[in-house]
């Protein structure tokens, strides 16, 4: 187990390094001149070359990369070329909003998805099961940005119950701003909920036909105990692996959903910065996203190995 | 797993030439079975259509394909024809799905969008599967430094949540349908490469591969006619799973302004435009999204049914495990 742990974590650094190389490459290969973007078309050639020198863009690419990497090690991600604010400050401002959004969505998905999948499995083949699996298929197919728009049409435009965009007034208490979270959270949660419920259902059906369930029933255990203590517990172990997939989906969902709801999170920051060619911000935000994605994926894998000790030796090779 | 022909020990390297020629056809037939022969294929098709989901998926796909091919014939209007007096009109007998902000017929635009959408789904998975399978096959068969590099590149690509990587790539290539397709193909590459590599590693150890090498087959021939057909099934299934996902990503990129560009109609960029008129027209945003959902459900069902048909023992309705 310890060896597995060490191996998993030590694989993180090379991957991060390669990802940083890729991100750097993406940014430097992108068309458009950030200096021209910043100074406008009126700038004289002297101004342009001066600014280029100041930003270090005149140095050879490998050197630029090393400088960027060294700065990265000191948590210095440069400054936004649009508003000259430090990138770390921007990330610190936008990222908590995305965390709030994603974590709430994941909790909602777990709270609804797990019981729903379990319920469908216990009523396998009935009309209710058909309804739940049908809804799951729908949830997996609906484009998130469209779902967000439908929710806006229904709850913001027609019923006027919830605000269509933004995050609310920061000076008010967070509780009053909760209404701004509802629609984006639901939008993100639907996809995760459907995946979870679908997975729990099939895991549950697998487990319910296992020998130990028959044994538990045979020795006269009440059905509720059989389901809760024997079946669900074992069915939930493989579900942990889907959580790994969910993290990528949550972050991707955040990107799309934040755009639809003009919600100031990391996804919207990436989209806006790409449209503005604000390279330092894109680099910093992508690095953060990759780091979070990798770390959480490893955590999920490790917790899976912890919950199911049979896993670790398998994966070790 | 072991067939009688291969169990008699004659497939071990030191064999007389005569024995080898006798054994070779048996080996070949065995290798071909994974690729599906004519009768196996019709059986597969039958199983696919007998599955209710499969039938639904196939019919949706057929309808959308017909619409995509015949959109100039079946669409009631030119998708870019402006009806300036009928802007943002609700559905009516004249305009079944209503009109957009420039008075263009939404039904016609939805129909014309089937082409870029299906094209994106098809082209991305073909690209990703071909390149991914070739690379994965070679990596698994050769091993060594090539394998190491391929696997590191895959790890790196998989370190990004898919949509973030896709918009990163489109930023480099510039917005547009083809570039979006390339980006989606790239984010799908590592999955196909890994699948092909894993199957190759398993197959490489089988006796019939050793036997083919013993009869003097070249590496290229062994890979193409023995290893490749045997890792085809998981690749085909992955293609079926990845296609609807690709359509969703292409729509998302177009929605963000990075995929199909207006005035070319696509479901994604129609929705992007509709976003500005949510308060004025409730139906504008409805139909392009419905179209995406229907196609994706159809293709997901098709993928499900295909998996059941290829492996009938598979437990039904297992969730997709790739992302």
Image: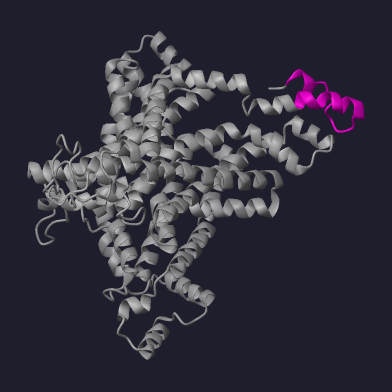
B201 is within the stretch colored magenta: no
Q: Nearer the viewer, residue B132 or B88?
A: B88
- Which residue is at 86% across, 33% downward? B13
| Residue drawn 80% across the image and 27% down it | B24
Residue A100 seen from this side: no
Numbered range of the magenta stretch: B3-27
When asked about the image quadrant of residue B198, the answer is top right
Residue in the image at 21% along x and 48% along y: B104
Q: Is residue B171 visible?
A: yes
Residue A6 rendering spot, x and y as whole percentages: 54, 51
> A281 or A303: which is nearer to us?
A281
The quadrant the C terminus of chain A occupies is: top right
Q: Which residue occupies the foreground of this view, B263 or A273?
A: B263
Q: Position of residue A152 (x, y in %)?
A: 16, 45
Instruction: Tell me which secondary structure the magenta stretch mostly adopts.
Output: helix
Horizontal placement of B206 versus A37: left or right? right
In the displayed structure, B147 sits above or below B96; it is below
Picture coordinates of residue B105 (x, y %)? Answer: 22, 44
| Quadrant in which the N terminus of chain A is drawn | top right
- Relative to B206, residue B268 above or below: below
Along the line of sight, which residue is nearer the eye, A21 or B290? B290
Residue B270 horizontal/vertical position (percent): 26, 48
Residue at image location 33% in from the left, 74% down from the top: A79
B4 within the magenta span: yes
């Amino acid at each position: 187990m310890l060896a597995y742990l060490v191996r998993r974590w030590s694989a993180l650094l090379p991957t991060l390094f390669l990802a940083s190389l890729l991100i750097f490459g993406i940014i430097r290969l992108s068309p458009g001149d950030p200096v021209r973007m910043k100074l406008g078309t009126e700038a004289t050639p002297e101004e342009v070359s001066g600014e280029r020198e100041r930003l270090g863009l005149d140095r050879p690419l490998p050197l630029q990369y090393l400088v960027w990497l060294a700065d990265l090690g000191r948590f210095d991600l440069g400054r936004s070329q649009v508003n000259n604010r430090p990138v770390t400050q921007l990330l610190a401002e936008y990222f908590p909003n995305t965390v709030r959004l994603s974590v709430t969505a994941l909790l909602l998905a777990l709270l609804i998805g797990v019981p729903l999948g379990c319920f469908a499995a216990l009523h396998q083949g009935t009309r209710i099961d058909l309804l739940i699996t049908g809804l799951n298929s729908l949830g997996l197919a609906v484009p998130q940005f469209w779902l967000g728009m439908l929710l806006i049409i229904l709850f913001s435009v027609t019923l006027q119950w919830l605000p269509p965009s933004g995050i609310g007034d920061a000076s008010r208490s967070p509780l009053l701003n909760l209404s701004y979270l509802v629609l984006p959270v639901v939008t993100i949660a639907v996809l995760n909920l459907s995946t979870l419920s679908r997975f729990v259902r099939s895991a549950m059906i697998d487990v319910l036909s296992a020998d130990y369930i028959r044994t538990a029933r045979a020795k006269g255990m009440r059905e509720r105990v059989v389901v809760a203590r024997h079946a669900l517990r074992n069915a939930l172990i493989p579900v942990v692996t889907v959580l790994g997939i969910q993290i990528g989906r949550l972050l991707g969902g955040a990107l799309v959903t934040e755009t639809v709801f003009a919600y100031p999170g990391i996804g919207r920051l990436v989209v806006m910065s790409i449209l503005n060619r604000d390279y330092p911000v894109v680099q910093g935000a992508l690095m953060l996203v990759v780091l979070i994605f990798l770390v959480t994926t490893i955590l999920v894998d490790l917790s899976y190995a912890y919950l199911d000790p049979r896993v670790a030796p398998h994966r070790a090779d | 797993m072991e067939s009688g022909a291969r169990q008699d020990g004659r497939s071990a390297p030191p064999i007389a030439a005569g024995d080898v020629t006798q054994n070779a056809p048996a080996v070949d037939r065995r290798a071909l079975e994974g690729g599906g022969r004519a009768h196996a294929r019709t059986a597969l098709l039958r199983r696919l259509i007998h599955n209710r989901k499969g039938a639904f998926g196939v019919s949706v796909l057929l309808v959308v394909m017909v619409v995509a091919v015949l959109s100039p014939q079946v669409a009631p209007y030119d998708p870019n024809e402006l009806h300036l007096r009928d802007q943002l009109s609700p559905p009516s007998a004249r305009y079944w799905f209503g009109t957009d902000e420039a008075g263009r017929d939404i039904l016609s635009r939805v129909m014309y969008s089937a082409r870029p959408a299906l094209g994106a789904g098809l082209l991305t998975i073909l690209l990703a599967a071909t390149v991914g399978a070739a690379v994965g096959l070679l990596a698994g068969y050769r091993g060594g430094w090539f394998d190491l590099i391929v696997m590191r590149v895959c790890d790196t690509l998989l370190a990004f949540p898919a949509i973030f990587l896709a918009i990163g790539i489109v930023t480099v290539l510039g917005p547009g349908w083809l570039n979006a397709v390339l980006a989606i193909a790239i984010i799908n590459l590592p999955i196909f490469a890994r699948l092909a590599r894993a199957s190759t590693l398993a197959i490489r150890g089988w006796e019939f591969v050793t036997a083919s090498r013993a009869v003097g087959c070249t590496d290229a021939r062994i890979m193409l006619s023995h290893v490749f057909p045997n890792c085809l099934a998981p690749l085909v299934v992955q293609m079926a799973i990845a296609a609807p996902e690709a359509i969703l990503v292409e729509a998302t990129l177009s929605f963000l302004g990075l995929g199909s560009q207006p005035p070319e109609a696509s479901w994604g960029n129609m929705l992007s435009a509709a976003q500005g008129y949510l308060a004025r027209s409730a139906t504008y945003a409805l139909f392009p999204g419905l179209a995406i959902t229907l196609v994706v459900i159809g293709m997901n069902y098709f993928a499900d049914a295909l998996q059941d048909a290829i492996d009938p023992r598979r437990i039904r309705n297992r969730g997709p495990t790739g992302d």
